[in-house]
Amino acid sequence: MELADRMKKIPPYLFVELDRLKAEKQKQGVDVIDLGVGDPDLPTPEPIIETAKKALENPANHKYPSNRGLLSFRKACADYMKRRFGLNFSPETEITALIGSKEGIAHFPLAFVNPGDVVLCPEPAYPVYHLGAILCDAEPYYLPLKWENDFFPELSKIPAEVLQKAKILWLNYPNNPTGAVATKGFFKEVVEFAKKNDIIVAHDAAYVELYFNENEPPLSIFEIDGAKDVAIEFHSLSKTFCMTGWRIAFAVGKEELISALAKVKSNIDSGAFNAVQEAGAYALNNLEELVPPLRKVFKERRDFMIKALKELGYEFLEPEATFYLWVKTPNGLSSQEFCKKVIEECGIVVTPGNGFGPSGEGYFRIALTVDVSRLKEAVDRLATLKF
């Protein structure tokens, strides 16, 4: 039996390998501190759980969901976009529910990309952007995100012959793994670029609520005039409400883009479980009460690690959002060399930067998904490293 050519182009999923390394150390009896996968350790807020429990008891929720999701969930999404960003979207035509944003991101290219087309993918980045292109038999064209450019892609450097075949530009701000936050000027440049070149902008806004500067919350791309003509935006409840296992998210944008994604999904999946959608609607409707305490915890962890890593001599830009630190490897070590050394000598899992793309070489990512006492133990172990 031979795999399809597209499958041969897919490398092992980054976090599968991390899980393997972690399991090996645990079998050896090592107390592993996992700062690798971005899976929040905080529990889902209790009111969301209680809402889900009640929804589970309703027999109407035991049937197939509607294709685009419960209207009550989509109305909650629209209300959130209005409260948070001052934007108006129709819950009937401009929003669709997703089984987690990863699912929607992977499926979206199927609606617009043909074999041989180009998908513009930032790197380092969440691997699903370029994997979705590969599974469409399209060609990913990689846009390096570099320290010296504030981790923004240089759109002006994309060759004309690439632009002629490009269908989608993926973006992700606040950014995983770098922690960069988009400026209004950058988003304006993106919208102008997309209109000029007839390219769809697909913006992954999964971390838009995990910010630390209360005076400058991150933007939606739709806050830029004209963005609605060219963009779709993916919002996830996973990190915002510590609901990663619940698999609930939504896409919002131009009706043509949302309808196309919904059509793909109607032929591939049967929608998000209604009980989870009801819990998601409650979460979005009560975001202003539920999320600040979670943000406070992640800020405390971020502030601790920034101070501790600086004292150990590590170099990085302080993130204004996400629960990640994107750190340069010390002493000229490669990403893989450093991360292997850290797990073998310290029993700590961190993510090698090159796993997110070639431009991630020379970096590693720390996920702030353990409490401060555990982070302190990790720092104490890092302090013993010899180079």
Image (cartoon, helix red, strand yellow):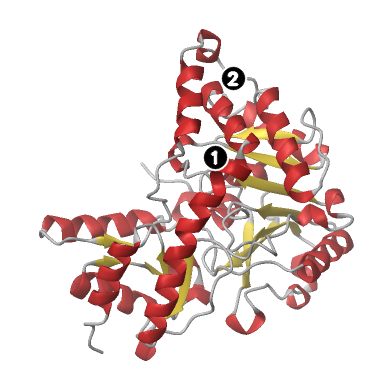
Q: Quadrant of residue 350?
A: bottom left
- Whether residue 271 is visible, yes or no, is no
Residue located farthest toward the left when viewing the structure as drawn: 29
> The residue under label 2 is which amino acid type?
Pro
> The residue under label 1 is which amino acid type?
Gly
User: Of callouts 1 and 2, which one flags the residue occurring earlier in the amino acid sequence?
Assistant: 2
Crowdedness near tag 1: few (<14), some (14–19) or many (≥20) residues, C-alpha within 10 Å:
many
Give x and y (percent) for residue 277: 57, 28
Split into 4 quadrants, where in the image is the C terminus? bottom left
Q: Is residue 110 left or right of residue 382?
A: right
Give x and y (percent) for residue 22: 24, 58
Give x and y (percent) for residue 302: 46, 67
Give x and y (percent) for residue 143: 64, 71
Identify the residue shown where x is 47% and y is 59%.
Answer: 298
Q: Which residue is mark 1?
A: 100
Identify the residue shown where x is 45% and y is 77%.
Answer: 327
Q: Which residue is mark 2?
A: 65
Instruction: Give above or below for 31 relative to 250.
Output: below
The alpha-carbon separation of the residues under discs 1 and 2 comes to: 15 Å
Of 166 and 235, nearer the camera is 235
- Helix, strand or loop under label 1: loop
Crowdedness near tag 2: few (<14), some (14–19) or many (≥20) residues, C-alpha within 10 Å:
some
- Do callouts 1 and 2 mark residues in contact (Cβ within 8 Å)? no
- Whether residue 143 is visible, yes or no, is yes
- Helix, strand or loop under label 2: loop
Of 48 and 253, nearer the camera is 48
Split into 4 quadrants, where in the image is the N terminus? top left
Identify the residue shown where x is 78% and y is 36%.
Answer: 94
Q: Is residue 22 left or right of residue 180?
A: left
Q: Is residue 281 left or right of residue 294?
A: right
- Count numbered badges in the picture: 2
Identify the residue shown where x is 52% and y is 55%.
Answer: 295
